[in-house]
Image (cartoon, rainbow, N blue to C red):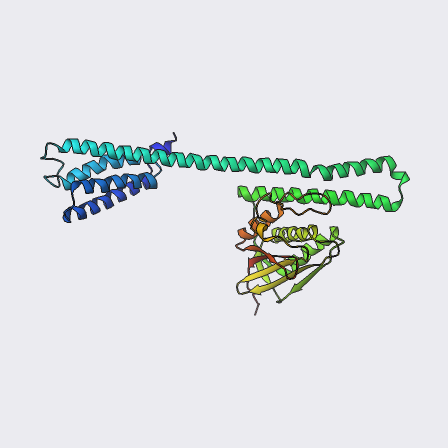
Amino acid sequence: MSKERIIPSIKDILITLLILSLASVIGNLFWKLGFTETNIITVYILGVLLTSIFTKSQTSSAIYSLASVLLFNFFFTEPRLTLHAYETGYPVTFAVMFCAALITGTLANRLKENTREKEIAAVLAKNEQLRANLLRSISHDLRTPLTSISGNASNLISNYEKMDESIRKQIFQDIYDDSQWLISLVENLLSITRLEEGRMNFNMSSYLMDEVIDEAVRHSNRKNKNHPISVAYKDELLLAKMDAKLIIQVLLNLIDNAIKYTPEGTEIHITAERIEHEILVQVIDYGKGIPNEIKAQVFEMFFTGNNKIVDSRRSLGLGLPLCKSIIEAHGGEITLKDNEPCGSVFCFTLPADEVKMNE
């Protein structure tokens, strides 16, 4: 048993004294209203339960039990306001009251301890399941790009001279695409880990939203040749408080998600506007959309849905949870809605900043 469970803290002592005081005040009110001593004893025993619930130290219940007997003797037995008792049966009453209070406190503490152990076990089981899902996903999903890279490299080594220029360029492009996918995966894994452990350093500053979006689009266009991306700004000078590098990562993940789940040649549209004290950014695609029954799960870790990616690689389901964590850490919100007549719209908000004009 840990030390904090045995030795009560100052907070536990103050809570115990508060509950004792309240029980004594209620007991005194019952006395004036003509209630029996049994009712008053019940109030003190109820206080034991409250002490067990609101304090961490198991000793607090024992202290309360002893103090409640002394207070009952002091306030509610004749002669009142003394620790003496005229009635010969009072010592037995005090002993029974103390035992009842002590047993009640002990049972309440055990119940609280069992509940705490179940919660810890549930958290451990969830973490173990997350680790198992991660290992299973990584072992399955990394095999395809790594095998592709290895096979293409071996083919180049063995048959380089026999290949014409177009075939060599295609193989180099395949190796590049697979390596970029792996780099994106590793960046998402590292970011998720840092956010979960609280080690992510946010370099918050004021940035123009159009510059951040344009940078994300430039990065995306380097590896995206089949999905035209258009951008529209509904307001001028959209200034937001953000870590620009992380918001670019959010945009890249949302654009990449749109590319994966829409047919080649389908346009991806990005808009940005100011709504009161927030900057609203939308990444709009015109694919098949996301079924209503799984909309609530798309931001969960390792959730990939039933959609199949055109290059046969499954997603690990880290991109959208990472976006959610980053946006919420900025004080914003990320949501998903349908695009009419088809497709999906991922929206996120950031705190707007005011443009300061030098006079």
Reply above or below: 208 against 83. below
**Residue 42 position within the rendered picture, expressed as x and y whole percent measured from the top left:** 23, 40
Residue, x 71% and y 55% (percent of image)?
218
Residue 202 is at least partly visible in this image: no
Q: What is the quadrant of the C terminus in the image?
A: bottom right
Closer to the camera in the image, 190 or 242: 190
Residue 133 is at least partly visible in this image: yes
**Residue 26 position within the rendered picture, expressed as x and y whole percent measured from the top left:** 21, 47
**Residue 302 position within the rendered picture, expressed as x and y whole percent measured from the top left:** 60, 43
Q: Is residue 141 left or right of residue 88?
A: right
Residue, x 44% and y 35% (percent of image)?
118
| Quarter assignment of residue 180 | top right
Reply above or below: 210 against 123. below
Residue, x 24% and y 31% (percent of image)?
99
Reply above or below: 57 against 340. above
**Number of marks in the rendered image:** 0
Residue, x 61% and y 38% (percent of image)?
134
